[in-house]
Image (cartoon, rainbow, N blue to C red):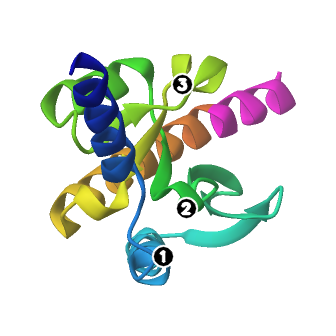
Amino acid sequence: MKKRNSKASTNKAQATETPDPRLNEKLPANFRRLALSLEGAEEGSHMGAADFRVGGRIFATLASQHLGYGNLMLTPEQQADFVRELPEVFLPVHGGWGRMGATHIRLAKASDDVLMGALRTAWALRMAKNAKTNRKKRSSRLG
């Protein structure tokens, strides 16, 4: 009996992680639309996957869209806050990228408001990093 229950729970867990094929185009298209609505955002490509950049630097990607995820480039602290607040929507990317703040967002579980807030957070972080980098470049040229 225990084996049957564990198998059922394993199948249930896998079923919740498998995106609905009908959403394969709609959800990434919504992610793309919202990401590109941010000031200065442009779509590019990195290793064959769509990415979203501001000032030439990536703040979000659709590299994991085949798994039903978008990816956000956050700080580890921001990632922890998002995961703590909405663990059914956000999870760290596996490995070193995840430890540095790269975060999956489950597209099927994220409302437009949550998705836009998360994209705006990643975009604002990238804008701040770009401004910091530009200041360093200017000061080294002047010095």
Quarter of the image where the N terminus is located? top left
Quick one: label 1, few (<14), some, or many (20+) residues within 10 Å? some
Residue at left 49%, top 26%? 101
Residue at left 34%, top 32%? 7
- Place of residue 11 in the rendered image (x, y in percent of width and height, measured from the top left): 35, 42
Q: Is residue 116 above or below residue 104?
A: below
Tell me the SS state at disc 1: helix
For marks 3 and 2, the one nearer the N-term is 2
Tell me the SS state at disc 3: helix
Residue 86 quadrant: top left
Q: State the extent of the magenta-drawn residues as a range.
A: 133-143
For marks 3 and 1, the one nearer the N-term is 1
Residue 75 quadrant: top left
Q: Is residue 2 above or below residue 72?
A: above
| Residue 73 among those drawn in magenta | no
Q: How many marks?
A: 3
Q: Is residue 110 above or below residue 81?
A: below
> Tag 1: residue type?
Asn
- Place of residue 64 in the rendered image (x, y in percent of width and height, measured from the top left): 58, 53
For marks 2 and 1, the one nearer the N-term is 1
- Place of residue 60 in the rendered image (x, y in percent of width and height, measured from the top left): 54, 53
- Label 2 sits on residue: 65
Label at residue 24: 1
The CA span between labels 2 and 1 is 8 Å
